[in-house]
Amino acid sequence: MDTLPVTTENPEAEQWRLLSQFAYYPNIRRHLENSGFGTVEDETVQFVAGSIRQSQAFFQAAEDSPLDISPLLLYYGATNLLIGAYTLKTNDRPDIKHHGMIITDHVADRIADVRMLPRYREHGGLQQFANVFSNGCDLANGHAWTMGEILGAIPDLRRDFERHYQDLPYHAVPVEVIRTRQRCMERISNDDLTRYPGPEEALSQIPGLSQAYLVPQYKPDWVVLHPKLQGVEIGTYSSSNRKYLQIGHNKGGGMVVPNQLILLYMGLFVLGFLPRYLPALWNPFVQSDTTGEKLIVEKFLAICQRYMPNLVLNSIFGRRIQFLNETEGILDLTTRFTEDELKQIVKETVRELREQGEIASFTREGLKRLIVETIQQIQTQGEM
C-alpha cells in the first residue's frame, strides 16, 4: 500500500476533517460513483452521512469523558465509523443483527484475562467488518480471545505490554527497514523475540512470511529478511509509521491474523462491555488499580481515539495516510541516482531473479517492465 503524507500539526483533527467530507451527500455520491458503482441510492447516501456524523460525535464525547464510560462511547463511535466505511467500500449497508461478540463466563482477576467469543458468522457485526476490512479473516470460528491477546497485537502498545505482562506472549514484532540505493532489506532484533523458544519458532508463526520474503538469514543479533521481487506485502504499521510483523493467533490449529483495525474494535467491545455488565470488576479497577494495568488500558483507548479513524481512512482510500509535521515546499535532489547506480540496480534485480530461479519465466519485454517497476517502487519509497 502506497503512503500518502499529509502535513499537519494536529493529526487527530485533520483525520476527522478528511472523514467529515463523507457527511455531505454530494461527496458520498461522487466517491461511490468514482469507485465504479453505477447506481447509488439516496438511502445509502443518507446512511453513510448519518453514520459518519454520529461516529465523530461519539469520539468527541469519549475524549471528554472519564474512564467509567469512555470505552463504551468509543465502541459506539467505532461501530458507526465502520458501518459508514463499510457502505462506502461496498455501496451496500451491512446486514448486522448482533455485535458478533460476547463475553464468556470466564472469571478474570485482571483485564487481560477477560475472554471474548466471536460468533454469528452471517449477521454478527465483527465478522461482517472483518470480511471487508480484514480480507475475510474468519473470526466466528468458535474460539475465544483474551483481552491480553488483543493488547499484545497492537504495535503502539508493544513496549508497555512487554514491561507489564511478563507472562504473556506478544504478537507484534518491530521491523527495522534498511534502504540503500541498490536494495531494500529488513531485520528483526533477536531481543524482540525472546518470549518465543527461538527466532525460527517465532517466524514460523507469521502467516505469509514465505510469500513475502526469501529464506530468513539468522544472525547472532538479527534476523535478516530480503523481500521477494513481486512478493506479497505483509505486516502492519504503528501510528508513527514503524513497521511490525504480526505473529498469528492459534485458533483451533490454524493461525488467525486480524488486521489492526479489527483488533482495536475487538478490544473496544471488551472494554465497553465491562462497565455495563461487570461493574464488580471494572469499578475497582478504575478507582483503585495498584498493578499498573490501568495505564495499559488508558493507552489502548488513546490509540483507538487517535488511530482508528486513520486506519479507516487508509481502507477507504487504499493508501496509508501518514500525518507529518514538517516543512513543505522543499525538493531534496541530493539522493538522485546516477547512471552507474541505475545500472547497478538492474544488475541486482537480474541477480536476484536468477537466485530465485525465476529468470527463465520472463520475456525480454517482461524483464524490462519489472526493472522499471522496481525503480518506480524505490522512487515512491523516497529513495530518489
Image (cartoon, rainbow, N blue to C red):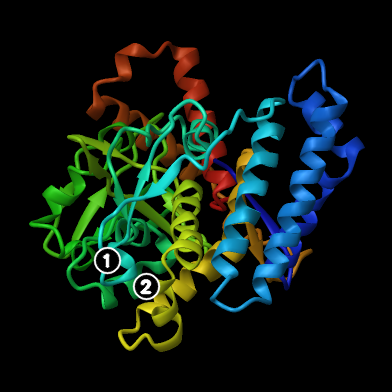
Horizontal arrangement in the rendering, residue 68 relative to residue 216 (left or right): right
User: Residue 46: where, in percent of width, then height?
Assistant: 84, 36
Horizontal arrangement in the rendering, residue 122 relative to residue 384 (left or right): left
Q: In this view, does 303 lie above or below 379?
A: below
Q: Mark 2 points at which residue?
A: 281
- Residue at figure coordinates x 45%, y 62% from the top left: 277
Q: Seen from this angle, which residue lies furthest left?
A: 197
- Per the image, label 1 sits on a secondary structure element best described as loop
Q: Quadrant of residue 89?
A: top right
Q: In which quarter of the image is residue 71?
A: bottom right
- Per the image, label 2 sits on a secondary structure element best described as helix
Q: Would residue 293 be seen by someone viewing this image from the given angle?
A: yes
Q: Would residue 331 be seen by someone viewing this image from the given angle?
A: no
| Badge count | 2
Q: Is residue 145 above or below residue 233?
A: below
Q: What residue type is labelled 2?
A: Leu
User: Residue 131: where, in percent of width, then height?
Assistant: 50, 31
Instruction: Choose between 36 and 319: the one closer to the eye.
Output: 36
- Residue at figure coordinates x 57%, y 56% from the top left: 75
User: Residue 223: where, in percent of width, then height?
Assistant: 20, 55
Check whether the beta carbons of the residues at disc 2 and disc 1 lie within 8 A of each other: yes
- Residue at figure coordinates x 42%, y 54% from the top left: 179
Answer few, some or many: residues within 10 Å of disc 2's Cα (few below 14, many 20 plus, some between 14 and 19). Answer: some
- Residue at figure coordinates x 34%, y 68% from the top left: 111
Q: Residue 108 carries which label?
A: 1
